[in-house]
Amino acid sequence: MNVHEAYDNIEKIICYGFLTVGVTIDGVEIILKNMTDREYERLQFYVLDKDNTASQFLLQVAMATFMINGINVLEDRPCKVEELVSFYSKLPNQFVLRIVEIIRELQERYIETIRYLEGYCYTDGSRQLWKSIGVDGSFRVCTGVPGIDSVGINQVQQSWMLINRQLDDEVKYGQDFGLSIMISSSFNAKGARSVQRSYEVRREELDQLRKDIAKYGFDKKRISEEKKSNQWTAPIKSREDLVRELYRQIRGKKDKHDLFVEQWIERQKKAAEEAKRRAEERQITFRKELESIDLAQVEPSRPVTIEEIQKVKDKPKETTSDYISSYKNLDTRDRYIQKISARVIRSTDDKKR
């Protein structure tokens, strides 16, 4: 789902309270909608057989019906729920199951759209819609569809209204702040300019952040940072996060950091076992080679004789010294160094003898 599609869905959810999709069954045009949180709460007030799964499905399908052949069933809804349940009970089971599947897909699309709500609230279209609906939140005035109020306000509408009221408060605060700066500048112009510059810098940063959120539908930078941190350990930013992390460790549920440490320990164990195996193989090979030697063919050891020792002493030392035979291309300093080095080498050899 891209940003533009998500914003269109959010506008429909705000105005109508739900998303819709049309299906045709045996020539009957049915417009289905997703169930809101208020409608899920109302299901418990209908007297049905709790053990009968089919009746529960039929009731959910009835609550998720918006129009049948162009007739709005949201008007006088309490009286029409039983008629809808009776209508759907006469349909084949495969049709009812298909409708339930469509409603489930519509509900998933509704949930996926919610993550783009903050970005939509910062768009110009959202602010214009807020001005047209008004602070009382009369969504029926905006749509003109009767029966919308029977669905009840959903969490998206509530959050959208709260954010827009907060934005209105920020606008009013900015106006009051400008008036206070104008008054304070007559007493302390330098201090007023400093406070105003600080406010403008923070205001520009906030406006830029909201533009980015409106562009992508959410705070992309924050989401990416949280995603990176969540890949290794659970974020601990509050007391609730700390308690949640404690219970996670008590349950033995492992995060990516724990899995990485376990994999590292497993690799170290495998490396140690491999080194141990190779050492044992070398020992076995050495023992086999030692056992294969015929001791009868091995020459027995004997002490060294005096003649052999003297022979080693009389052996000349292989000492080579390269001297420069010609000094034609050398200057006086290099010739002097060569002569001194030759004398030192000769005297050292004489002492050794």
Image: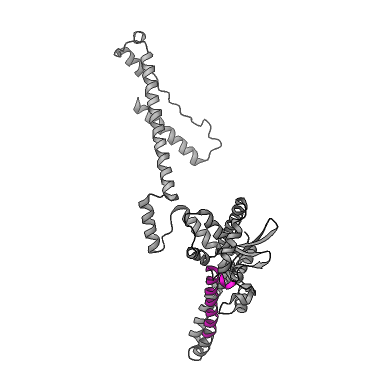
Question: What's the residue at 39%, 58% (across, down)?
Answer: 244
Residue 209: where, in percent of width, then height?
A: 56, 69
Q: Is residue 187 left or right of residue 249?
A: right
Q: Is residue 239 left or right of residue 5?
A: left
Question: What's the residue at 47%, 54% (across, down)?
Answer: 51
Can residue 148 be found in the magenta stretch? yes
- Report which quarter residue 238 is drawn in: bottom left
Residue 22: where, in percent of width, then height?
A: 66, 60
Residue 99 sits above or below residue 304 on the image: below
Question: Relative to the observer, which residue lies in front, 132 or 164?
Answer: 132
Residue 36: where, in percent of width, then height?
A: 54, 65
- Report which quarter residue 278 is drawn in: top left
- The residue range painted magenta reads 147-176
Magenta segment's dominant SS is: helix
Q: Can residue 193 be seen?
A: yes
Question: Relative to the observer, which residue lies in front, 43 or 214?
Answer: 43
Residue 330 sits above or below residue 74 on the image: above
| Quarter of the image that includes the C terminus | top left
